[in-house]
Image (cartoon, rainbow, N blue to C red):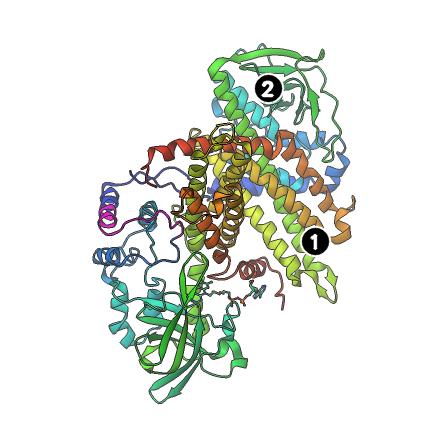
Amino acid sequence: MDFSQVVFTPEQLALESEIRSIIEANWTPNYSHIAVDHDRMPVEVRMEFAKRGLLHPDLPKDQGGAGLGELELEMIAGIADEYWMPTNVSNSMLIPTLEKHGSDWLKENVLPGIRRGEITTCLGYSEPDNGSDVAAATTKAVQDGDTWVINGQKMWTTWGNESDYVFLLARTGPVEEKHRTLTMFLVPMDVPGVEATPVWILGGGRTNVTFYTDVTISDQYRVGPINEGWSVMSEPLATEHGAGVETQGVAPVNGTMGQTFSRVFEKFVDASIKWAASRKTPDGKSRLEDPITRLAIAEAMLDLEMCWNAEGELGKPMSAEALSRNADRMADIAAPEGLLDFGVDGSIYAGNISSERQHAPGTSVYGGTTEIYRNNLARRLGLPRPY
Amino acid sequence: MSLTLRRNDYSLTDEQGQLVDMLRDLFTEQSPIGLVRAAEPLGFDETLWNTVKENGLITISVPENAGGDGGGLVELVLAGIEIGRTAAPVPLLDQVVALRAFAALSAAGADLAGFDLDAALAGDVIVSVAPISTWELGAQLIPSGAVAKAVLAFKDDSIILMTRQTPAPQAQNEGCAPVAWWSPADADVTTTTVLAGGQAQAIWELVQREWRIAAASSLVGLLAISSEMAREYALDRKAFGVTIAKFQAISHQLADIHMDVVTARNMTLKAAWLTENEPKYRPELASMAMAHATRAALRSTTKAAHVYGGMGITLEADISLFYRKVTSWSLVGGGMRRDLEDIARAIDTRAAELQLQSSNR
Ligand SMILES: Cc1cc2nc3c(=O)[nH]c(=O)nc-3n(C[C@H](O)[C@H](O)[C@H](O)COP(=O)(O)OP(=O)(O)OC[C@H]3O[C@@H](n4cnc5c(N)ncnc54)[C@H](O)[C@@H]3O)c2cc1C
């Protein structure tokens, strides 16, 4: 057991100032935008990071990384967070998948660009008629000699309007066979027949519907064996879910998404404190002294500490639900200003609060709903499948 | 600004792992549920207490220079979890917290007024603390107060020692815990001031935190066993031709209970380690661990009992015993109201920090 403060080596301190100067030169924080988990890393930062192997810092140097450990990864995440800078990069979880399952052609022509941050990707799993039940995908890929013809529609293809490739889950046999007739492709998005139209979500974020009409691609874009798409896809999905992450005792234990949401929650608690400090009660005291406000913020702080302690797969659902619960609560506590958008007269930090109330419900959905997480957890507890 | 990072390592050493195994075996064997029931209503079993003594557990987390084994708060938490799992009717946690307080008092040169500390270290005299004495003046409910002959408390800027020839009468309670009212004004109570001033305040601040961590650990154990029992029942019990564990309304409750167990355990271990090693860092952590363990234990033992249907509310069912025991460890320390007041002090700390940061945020 160890919760002590890390003493940085000179190399780590040098890394810290290097990262700071890259960010300061290339990024202007927007403090009205409390949740950046749906945004991409600014392209200028991405390019500077890539030059130094910091885009995929944990990869060995000869694979385009910087050969850094968990501690340095945490440093990068912590500094980025300080500047409210999004860190989503062209799905770095895809790199190991492509290494393992990609065709030689993909490995030669696409993988290096992904490593260098020049090529971006998005995920095409969900469809209009199936999200949680992702193995019910109906988007079809039909083999025609050395090519495939793809037809169908994907839903929630986040960054589908600005990516070079989509990692696509396609049906390559009878749909009744569910997991056994799925195949993965890395489809270039600039070929004829691919189209993305926007879907706007609460809080102002964008995701997309993507349409695939007679999209014809070479077999070289296939990732992994035909009809083994389920296991090929499950690997990065498991990374996203926080399973199998081996900790060396530095990273928070609450998984990738749990950590992301907890950082948002942390800013949210700060915003609540700033709001209270800037307001007075009718008798002229600071709102910080008002017992009801104190209670609400103290409970939010308690929930936040709980989220940091929610291990592995628990991190996501607990953080998502705590965010929503506290965002509802604080918006109400900060009433009437709690309803005002950022920048509106009287809103200042309440702008953060209302924008978080807009953002929070999504955290219980994307990357797998809280119900699906509970199903998975129940399975791990040895309980039978419900259906 | 410069970045600070902390480790997040919850792992136990091999030694700590062995300690858990030893404690698990000991309490499972020596504190079966029948013994727990037989020890009610007082909530104390002399034979089990003797076993605890013989196994050297009294000094488990007492510093070596104060006659102990040199274990720390983490070891106390590990013991607390096993006590909670078996609802063991022994006042070990209060005893150890009090002994740690005595050790700190001795180190500070306090005048123990002839108190027989060796007898307490041997477990022959049961000692306890008054966890809410800075808050509740006068008579107060004392954990293990119905079996203790000496109680440390805080009054008017001083740590006081209250002693009695015979323990105070138990105040009847749903968890059948040996709690009792003690008052310095009581004619049967002899009160001496053992340490005054700033040093006393600093020691007492830590005593309160350590008591909360110990109490939280027993709630963690109680939660863990309730969770396991409800899970087993759900796998066994059938309704509409299937095991009830197949219903999501049940399995999702079990998932929620599990989340409470894991988070309460981790928060308590983290608070224990940091309180021991860096008491100045985030002083609210002990109250956070206690507050979360309290709300988790209250809501999750309710859910666990509910998984049993009607059986869950019968006195005969073991799950209802754990449901009752929750209050023994959670409410006697003042409950969440007290903890949240502590946590709220962290708002002021954070507000001051934020003021120092750039004003344009
Ligand atoms: C902002 C955003 C971004 C996203 N980005 C991407 C992306 O980039 N790529 C991608 O492929 N997908 C993406 N998704 C899709 C996301 O993964 C799905 O929305 C999610 O898996 C839920 O699927 P669904 O929306 O179809 O809801 P449904 O699966 O239809 O679920 C509806 C409701 O039923 C519940 N439910 C469903 N099945 C069960 C069950 N077995 N047990 C209990 N309850 C159940 C759900 O929990 C939910 O409450 C994104 C979604 C959002 C909102």
Q: Chain of mark 2?
A: B
Q: Residue at x 71, y 39 (%)?
A: B324
In this rendering, do the residues under marks 2 and 1 share a single chain? yes
Above or below: residue B11 compared with residue B58: below
Looking at the image, which residue is at 54% across and 20% down? B102
Q: Earlier in the sequence, mark 2 or mark 1?
A: 2
Q: Check the picture and name the quadrant holding the C terminus of chain B.
A: top left
Residue nearest the viewer, comparing B187 with A116: A116
Image quadrant in which the N terminus of chain B is located: top left
Residue at image point 47% right, 43% down = A337
Pick whichever, B271 or B228, lies toward us: B271
**What is the secondary structure assignment of the residue under circle 2?**
strand
Q: Is residue A33 magenta?
A: yes
- Residue A383 occupies quadrant: bottom right
The image position of residue A28, as x and y in percent, is 28, 49
Residue type indicated by callout 1: Val
Relative horizontal placement of residue A204, taking residue B173 as reference (left or right)? left
Give me the disc on residue B307: 1
Residue indicated by mark 2: B152
Point out residue B98 in the picture as x, y percentages from the top left corner: 58, 24
| Residue A250, above or below B249 | above
Which segment did they paint magenta? A18-35
Give coordinates of residue A220: x percent, y percent.
Answer: 31, 80
Q: Residues within 10 Å of mark 2 (few under 14, many from 20)?
A: many
